[in-house]
Image (cartoon, rainbow, N blue to C red):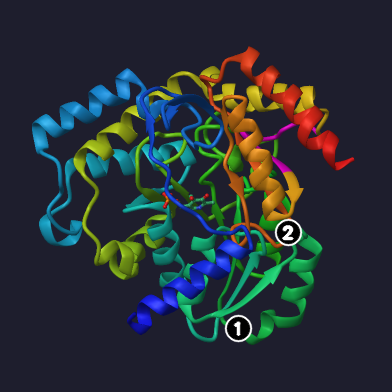
Amino acid sequence: MSSVDAFAREKLAGLESQSLLRSLVETERTDGVWMDRGGRRLLSFSCNDYLNLSQHPEIKAAAIAAIEQYGVGSGASRLVTGNHPLYAELEARLARLKGTEAACVFGSGYLANTGIIPALVGSGDLILLDDLSHACIWAGARLSRATVMPFRHNDVAHAKALLREHRARHPRVLIATEGVFSMDGDLAPLVDLAALARQFDAWLLTDDAHGLGVIGGGRGSSFVGGERPDVPLQMGTLSKALGAYGGYLCASRPVIDLMRNRARTFVYSTALPPAVLAGAIAAIDLIEREPAYAALPVGKAKAFTRQVGLPDAVSSIVPVVVGEADAALAASHMLEDEGFLVVPIRPPTVPDGTARLRFAFAAAHPDDEIIRLADIVRTRVVGNKR
Ligand SMILES: Cc1ncc(COP(=O)(O)O)c(C=O)c1O
């Protein structure tokens, strides 16, 4: 056996012994929330297509029309091959939705964070990030070569203490967090973080991957509640509630122009397919037109948490922390036997000892199935922990 194969096998055996081995399971999704897997039909709570727009007739029609008109691939990077007119339209729509001067679309949310952060800060600068931040925020932070200091999850006092101690030694400081936390479903205290950023002349970046289209009337986490936090760097993805693909940054005109010049994942990566751009534009149309529809996933999540006896959901994501990875796997298998797909989330995606079931609620989930699921979770998952 070659040494690289031996290395891979040893790593995989280690993962398997800790119940952390992952494998791809063929799953066909032909409808908003129902999946075919291994010949069985399952109701999925493991999909971020919160508004089921990836299957929406209007969005599909827009994407098909774009393919017919422009073809499939885009050919090269936007700076090289020329900017597709659908980009200008999509970026203008995103900026309007988020209330910023301009927007810049990237190839994915992951590419956005790994491009934006190193374009803004570098060696000698400081990044404070919530310690539950998504892997791509961490990746962008590490790529930047700035000093990275995590603060305890949603702990503004901890972030403040770090700024008091370290701010003066760094020319530029970025504070990064998620608007809606992807594995916990809670919201960042954006009003307080924005005030803190202002006080210490730091730049606040929010990743609203799970907020756009779902909270704040569909406009995301900066639009929840009466007070509007000043968030100069609003990042997010088009791949979840918008049902399409791609990432974005909404910000001021100079920041967006800087991205187009210096964000390496923008400059050196091929533009998105036109069909994806057209689908995302159609999705924004729908969200702006139908805020009551955009509110459905959180309403469904709340119905679930009330039936289980958990604190009210504040987003479309509800975690039920089980503890060890093998317990989360067993709970997931039990739910699959009952007809539900709820994939266990295990380390390193979440911290050790906090493996969980992550329920993602979508507009098309039938109410009676949510109640049936909640009753099973209450009696056989939450009840078991007591
Ligand atoms: C918080 C957060 N940020 C960024 C991403 C990455 O976005 P994308 O899937 O568009 O690469 C995700 C999705 O996995 C996410 O949950």
Q: Secondary structure at mark 1?
A: loop
Three-letter amino acid code at disc 1? His
Three-letter amino acid code at disc 2? His
Residue under the image location 42 percent in, 65 percent down:
114
* Residue assigned mark 2: 153
Task: Mark 2 and ligand 1: say if the CB distance to the nearest ligand atom is below 8 Å.
Answer: no
Q: Secondary structure at mark 2?
A: loop
Look at the magenta stretch and give its main secondary structure: loop
Residue lying farthest to the front in this orientation: 1
Indicate the position of residue 21 as horizontal and vertical percent values: 53, 58
For residue 221, the mark is none
Image side of residue 274 versus residue 11, left or right? left
Does residue 184 belong to the magenta stretch? no
Does residue 312 belong to the magenta stretch? yes
Magenta segment range? 311-320
Residue under the image location 81 percent in, 28 percent down:
379
Indicate the position of residue 331 as horizontal and vertical percent values: 68, 39
* Residue assigned mark 1: 170
Residue placed most toward the observer, 86 or 347: 347
Image side of residue 85 versus residue 312, left or right? left
Which of the two labelled residues, at mark 2 and mark 1, occupies the earlier sequence position?
A: 2
